[in-house]
Amino acid sequence: MISHVSHLAVRQYSSLSSTSKSIHAVASKGFNLQTDAYAQTRPSYPEALLNKIQDILPEKASVIDLAAGTGLMTKALAAKGFNVTAVEPVEGMRNKLMEVVPGVPCIEGTSWNIPVESESQNAIVVAQAFHWFDDVKTVEEMHRVLKPGGYGILAWNLESGNRSEWVAMLRNCYEAYDSAVPQFRKMKWRQVFNTEEAKSLFALPYTSELFKHDYWVPKQDIWRRVLSKSYIASLDAPQQEALKVQLDAILKDVPTDDQNQVLYPHDSHLIYFVKK
């Protein structure tokens, strides 16, 4: 169900969409192809990270979950009592989010055209996505939407090759296919915060915190997790099968518990900054 404010915002977005920038073709194609795999195999966020967000925001804060995907962060924010509105450009993702978090408004929009009123939000959270739209227009639009003193909050889960040899081996295989797409690990997203525009809008430098996020997962789900990556989902079937053979060979010797689950180490990164 979309609130009255969200309904007005959807009409605003539709009227401006012809002049909006386009979302990355690989992101649009890949995430539409593997919506179910994304929803079922991507991890949520560690409680310590979510508690930190809760600490810096007011109780029942108004929060945009921008590029909300299938609602992993949306669901976590709603559980913390925030007044959440999900904004997501990919139709397949929006449909899945409305299944996963049916009580949260979910509207079409992009980082360059967030369809809500100016100075209406305590925070904009971007989970697992800022690297797709890390430009000046995005930070200008975030500034427009945030209340004075509002927070921009970025979060990423990253498989921890630093703390696991087999994870490092997996990443070496599948990251061979990501050379043409933006990724958090390439750290190019940081460049926008060095611009004069960003410095004029937000109190910088941003604050960065790191959290361990290790969890048990069925071994067979690891391939589906890799397949949920947009640049892998966009490969043709023979390329995907060849990659799966490589990954299966690595996973063969990874120890499991009595339910064929493996401990999957992740590092969760939290970045936050305040509107001037």
Image (cartoon, helix red, strand yellow):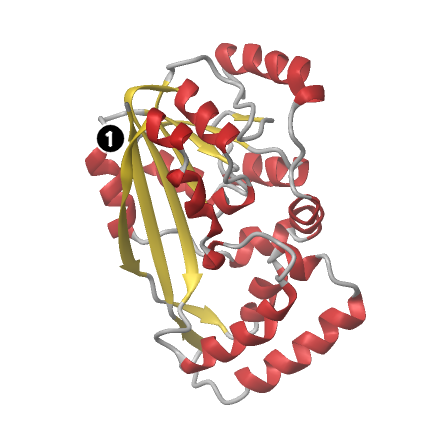
Total count of labels: 1
Give the crowd class for mark 1: few <14, some 14-19, many >=20 residues within 10 Å. some
> Dividing the picture into quarters, in which one does residue 196 lie?
top left
x, y (%) of residue 15? Answer: 67, 13
x, y (%) of residue 143? Answer: 40, 23
Identify the residue under disc 1: 57
x, y (%) of residue 73? Answer: 42, 42
Give the residue at x 67% y 40%.
92
- Left or right of 266? Residue 114 is right
Of residues 22 and 232, the one nearer the viewer is 22
Give the residue at x 67% y 75%.
243
**Amino acid type shown at disc 1:** Leu
Secondary structure under the numbered disc 1 in the rendered image: loop
Q: Height in image: 216 above or below 34?
A: below
Residue 160 visible, this angle? yes
Q: Height in image: 43 above or below 166?
A: above
Find the residue positioned furthest to the front: 196
> Dividing the picture into quarters, in which one does residue 252 lie?
bottom right
